[in-house]
Image (tube, grey):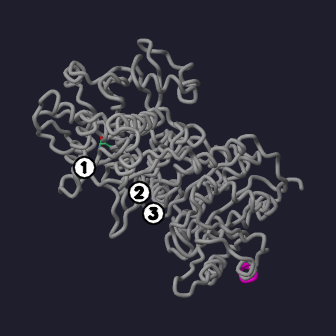
Amino acid sequence: MKKIGGHKYIFIIGGVMSGVGKGVASSSLGTLLSAKGFRVNLVKVDPYLNVDAGTMNPTEHGEVFVLNSGLETDQDMGNYERFLGRDLTNDDYITSGMIYKHVIEKERALGYGGKCVEAIPHIRDEIVGRFEHSARTNKSDISILEIGGTVGDYQNVMFIEAARVLKMRHPDDVIFIMVSYLPTPGKLGEMKTRPTQHAVQQLASYGVNTDIIIARAETALDDRRKAKIAVACNIHTKCVISAPDIESIYDVPINFDQDHLGNIVLEALHISPRKTTDEFKTWKKMARGIKNSSNNQIDIAIVGKYFNTGDFTLTDAYLSVLEAIKFSAYAAGVKAVIHTVNARDFEKGKINYSSLDTYHGIIVPGGFGETGIEGKINVIRYARERGIPYFGLCYGMQLMTIEYARTVLGLKGATTAEINPLATHLLIDIMPEQKKKIAEVNYGGSMRLGLYTASIFKDTIAYEAYGADKKFTGKKNKKSKTLNNSLQIEERHRHRYEVNHEYVEQLEEAGLIFSGKSPDGMLMEIAELPRSKHPFFVGTQFHPEFLARPLAPHPLFTAFMKAAKKRKSQQSVSILEKDGPEEVLTTYTLAYKK
Ligand code: GLN
């Protein structure tokens, strides 16, 4: 079949309920179609009125994912980048807030020439324009646009309306995929299709017909249910794709491929399949590896605070950190078991610091505000003094510096201006330009955000890690001038505060190494202790997790996982030495039983 029409658009819409993996389904379709040789771009459409995701509480909305540009976006954007292996741009993220802000500002500037400005046509047409714009700037063959929320929500109606108009203008080029959920109520023990049928009808009431249904459920759909859905929803049975719960999200593109989703989509879009690329082979190998990687299990604690929502515990706030660990665990030949530890539980005495001994590595991830920080600082001290591999991400690096100042330099009450701007020892202070923003109550999108360059100095853990990884330094390094024989890297940032330059010399004299600095030497980007003092004690002012990809694990995470692996092997050796060979197994099992 020859290609009919122009640029192709696939809209992904949720049915029945949220949180069933629309983002992963969209990303996986992206991987699959890229593997078939098409240039694909993914767009996330969020119906909320926030202009970006930056001001939202991570316990409610999950991780805030930062792009190279500094735009603060939804966590699905992280999945898109990881599944496409490509950096996304501001054109790939749309919120209602952005649309309304733009239209209202244009109206204030007489941009509509005296017309009455209304949702239809002005808001709708602005949305259509953005859909087309992202396709153009990405120079793609196919756009996959995921509309946030669920069919029936009041908030996303305007986006569905814009998609309908696009379909009306280009009937051969636009299709709609519904990612729906099929519950199996415990008492009934039977998978129910009716909610999905209703969702499809609801979408039809907006003038939009569903072309393909991705049926999410605990288990696979049987043929009877597929046929039932097909008849009720007016689609071919082969267009009902079964998507049961699986262990690893990186298997989803492979499962979709087995169900021929790629070809079904291409047929609906009137284009012929192309040859599958070698990249898909690499993907399959990685997906298999991540899932089945070694039985050498490494226990990693994430000591944070954004875990609890009501009676439930969610790790969404640290999604990219979890994924970065997964990729690097595979690279280091281990399997990471993640333990979420609430920093406040240490403060309340609910858990003892000595429980940290059971972990092979500890991470204190990014965070804001006062809650749990004393617990985190004590955890860092414990990790430092007991030689447990420690990796601090952003706040985790700032608190690591504070701990060092308090314990090693003896600076009592050392803290960050974020907690107490009047404290005597402000180890972490606000950047001058940030002071103004706070005084003006300008919080949205105003932190130090996005990609910034750092110089990495020789003979450090950071230099060793980055230096060995061409994917991270290769291209960029050729372009940039080297400073003092240093390596130039670029990483994504999201913070308002910095290590106070006034304390840098003292900290360095006391043994803390700033192995990464901004090219002018003013901002501290990486702090670490030398290997002679600690196996791995490293903190980054940036968020390395945002650049970790399944096919390109982040070098610092990999170095951390290797250190954790070493701790485990050394622990077993020391147990061996202490107890003699016969007792090894039992002691070992006890030590790691939790
Ligand atoms: N709260 C700290 C700051 O704003 C750290 C931010 C973070 O961890 N992302 O500087």
Q: Nearer the viewer, residue 548 or 350?
A: 350
Within-10-Å neighbours for mark 1: few <14, some 14–19, many 20+: few
Residue 158 visible, this angle: yes
Q: Position of residue 538 (x, y in %)?
A: 35, 32
Q: Point out the stretch of residues depicted in magenta.
A: 229-233
Q: Of label 2 and label 1, which has the lower sequence position? A: 2
As drawn, the label of residue 414 is: none
Tag 3 secondary structure: loop
Quadrant containing ligand 1 reads top left
* Dominant secondary structure (helix, strand or loop) of the stretch shown in magenta: helix
Q: Nearer the viewer, residue 558 or 545?
A: 558
Alpha carbon separation for disc pair 1 and 3: 25 Å
Q: Nearer the viewer, residue 273 or 322?
A: 322
Q: Of label 1 and label 3, which has the lower sequence position? A: 3
When the figure is inspected, residue 256 is found, relative to residue 210, above or below; the finding is above
When the figure is inspected, residue 413 is found, relative to residue 131, above or below; the finding is above
As drawn, the label of residue 369 is: 1
Q: Residue furthest bottom?
A: 188
Within-10-Å neighbours for mark 2: few <14, some 14–19, many 20+: some
Q: Amino acid at mark 2?
A: Thr
Residue 451 visible, this angle: no
Query: Is residue 273 rendered to the left or right of residue 488?
Result: right
| Residue pointed to by mark 2 | 315
Name the image quarter holding residue 260.
bottom right
* Magenta region includes residue 81: no
User: Looking at the image, is mark 2 or mark 3 nearer the viewer?
Assistant: 2
Q: Residue furthest top?
A: 484
Residue placed at 74% from the left, 55% from the top?
A: 8
Alpha carbon separation for disc pair 2 and 3: 22 Å
As drawn, the label of residue 48 is: 3
